[in-house]
Image (tube, rainbow, N blue to C red):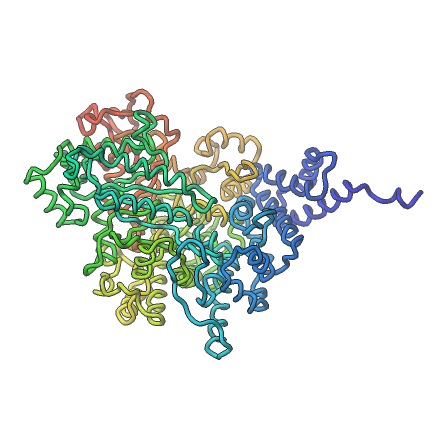
Amino acid sequence: MSASATIAPPEQDHIGRLRAAVAAHCRDLPDTDPERLIELVRSGRTATADAAELHQLAISAAAGLIGEDPQYARLAARLLADQIRRETAAQGIDSFSASVAAAQAQGLLDPAFADFVAAHAAALDALLDPAADDAFEFFGLRTVYDRYLLRHPETRAVLEAPQHFFLRVATALAVPIGGTPADGDAAVPTGGADGADGTAAAEAEVAEATEAAAGLYRLMARLAYLPSSPTLFNAGTRHQQLSSCFLVDSPRDELDSIYERYTQVARLSKYAGGIGISWSRVRSRGSLIRGTNGYSHGIVPWLRTLDASVAAVNQGGRRKGAACVYLDTWHADIEEFLELRDSTGDEARRTHNLNLANWVPDEFMRRVEADTEWSLFDPKDVPELVDLWGDEFDAAYRAAEAAGRAVRTLPARTLYARMMRTLAQTGNGWMTFKDVANRTCNQVGAGGGVVHHSNLCTEILEVTSDGETAVCTIGSINLAAHLRPAGASASGASSGAVASNPSAPSLPSSEPATDLAAERLDLAALAETVRIAVTALDSAIDRNYFPTEQAATAHRRWRPIGLGVMGLADVFAALRLPFDSPAATALSTRIAEEIALAAYGTSAALAARHGAHPAYPLTRAAGGVLHLDHWPAATPARTEAWAAVREQVARHGLRNSLLVAIAPTATIASIAGCSECVEPYVSNVFKRETLSGEFLQLNRHLVADLKRLGRWTPATRDAIKRADGSVAGLDLPAELRELYRTAWELPQKALIDLAAARAPYVDQSQSLNLFQADPTIGKLSSMYAYAWRAGLKTTYYLRSRPATRIAQTTVVRKSPVLSHPVVAGPLPNSLIGAGDDAVACSLENPENCEACQ
């Protein structure tokens, strides 16, 4: 036999190496089948397939099997991590400092940041943990690869691996300030200090920066905390626009002011900012224009122009621009405003890119409950109403009515029904509550200002004015990463111990629900995460690139941050707590309290070191009033700790005027492999989309339980898919069917009650989605009235499934709970509260609302 005959063909050699790699990755994934994966690769390969193509086929094959078992998500992620390492290695990138040098060579990074990394390469390179890639599931790593890693401008090859990316962000938030923004668009200087000069002070500063970067990097590598997307996109780059949220005050009722706002919005959108803007100061349709003796066309044409601008200026070419417009409920154009996203009617009066939100005073909700009249005004005639809230607003509003300045009046319930219809038809027209937002905001103190609206996602509440655009830099803690493994106890684990793999399935715990917070959730580790996160968020303010002067002015003056959470549903599932159980509410509230305590304490410590934020004397905290004090019914568990924090704040002040905000986390929760925000699972089987295609994902907690019961079979999987991700109809133990109810099957009262219980510890607000598979005006009217009475500051989307159901013909059916009919589908406004033929969930009968029970 010749020597050449013993050499395997290239294809066999490639397959052999791939088989070895797949087998190695599957060693701790017993429910994966390496040979099945190899056969799928063989069947899908082309005749000329090389090693790279075969590897890509293996990734796709593993991703395609996730719908059969969640362990394939880990396998696909490991194979993708291999591919990324090869891609960076091919460019000579074998360390963090090498990745920074490669990106800087292409002009992608801030020179001062790149110089710092080069000067301290050894110390920073030593921080890297390549094994941390194993924390990813496939969809999270694919998202990082497709959207976040820096790429060569021409070849589009990635210039950093995932851990280089995380360390870049962590280091950029810690590096001593010394540079200035890059040339190009005019930026607002952020100031800074002299660079390292070899002195002991400079060496100490570098050591401190490296330690800070290490602490933040370890959290991010473990997926225990992630900053928001703008920070992930831009940290360390030439334009370090790190903030997510911008609140732009309403333009004045002047042409120049309106067009100046368009420019502000465009600049903010360019650098990945989500925008909330009010339009309440602009006159209504039919208002006399004295300069021309003509009549105004109202706010709709102006919002059409804003709509086009938001669509045209996307967020750095990476995602679509996004804005939410807020309007006061008394504005005379409110009804036309509520029609802006309708799918029917005059397209010249529609805005399909803008989100819409109602800025609702208590006076309106009281009149809805009392079924009395509501007056609409032209802001040109009552300009004072925009800046008033609470008793002052009530008095001024009634005085304007008495003076006959109303454009027209209508039943309050008629307008409220129109709001509910907009929510049902579009999911938009979010209900946000003006008075509680101002009554509880720390910035609304001794002359601090007024909260005029919220942000794009309704979790940020800050004062705005003509000269101040409110800004917030946000990040979220992955609560699931702070669970100890089942069987571990508080006494048997260190305070810093967290789950090394937050994506791993958790088996049922035998511990009683009342002991779970102390035994399974590591509150000490959670507090340490808060301290690191608050410090990093505060640091981002000093490094931020501000696209407008108004944003720079406000952010430096108030220094607000928004620390939130994600993974709450994973915690509840791991601890066997149904979402609507009293134990779940107690644990959720305890988590919120621990976060608030640690956040206040950290901000006070930062104030002791660097000084309180410049506007601190104008805040309520300066007068000894903390956010918790606005909730007299709250019963904090840590009274001694609160006393200590109060003393600390009284002595040093606060570095940040606001601290806690619960944002939606759609993208970063995907990266972390946890459930979104504080929401329940929308489905136990759901589809994920990447640039590479669509893949199924499963509720890994449910799968673990079904495996334990021997019920994870093709038949069970198919049954769950046919039921749109529900297990309600499966022959399973009742406790599992209760535990794994989806958002569509849970009483919405539970979601509202959970949000209300944590509200005393959330000094900004919460992005609270509500869910109605079959929305009716009656269900919604009671649900949102309940949210208002519960003291919620804001709500977010109304999710319906499908949204088109609201347009179906009205059908009357008997409610299983109530003796009178329930009306499904759209209703005439006149039916709200109209007696026996009205909706079951009436405002007079809120405790029997079938949407909430």
Depth check, front residue: 212 or 407: 407
Is 764 located above or below residue 211 in the figure? above
Residue plotted at (50% across, 60% down): 217
Between 292 and 297, the one nearer to me in the picture? 292
Residue in view at x 45 percent, y 50 percent: 229
| Residue 475 shows up from this direction | no
- Which is nearer the eye, 737 or 693? 693
Most extreme residue toward the right is 1
**Residue 33 percent coordinates (x, y):** 66, 41
The reply, left or right, for residue 764 in relation to residue 375 is: right
Q: For the view shown, which residue lies furthest in the left direction?
A: 403
- The percent coordinates of residue 677 (x first, y second) are 40, 47
- The image shows a total of numbered marks equal to 0
Q: Report if residue 405 is visible in the image.
A: yes
Residue 629, x across and y down, in percent: 23, 58
* Residue 580 in the image, given as x and y percentages of width and height: 35, 43
Of residue 495 and residue 290, the one placed in the foreground of this image is 290
The answer to whether residue 167 is above or below residue 699 is below
For the point 56% across and 56% down, the residue is 103
Q: Is residue 113 above or below residue 367?
A: below
Looking at the rendered image, the quarter that the N terminus falls into is top right
Left-right relation of 406 to 426: left
Q: Is residue 793 left or right of residue 394?
A: right
Quadrant of image for the C terminus: top left
Q: Residue furthest bottom?
A: 200
Residue for point 70% across, 33% down: 43
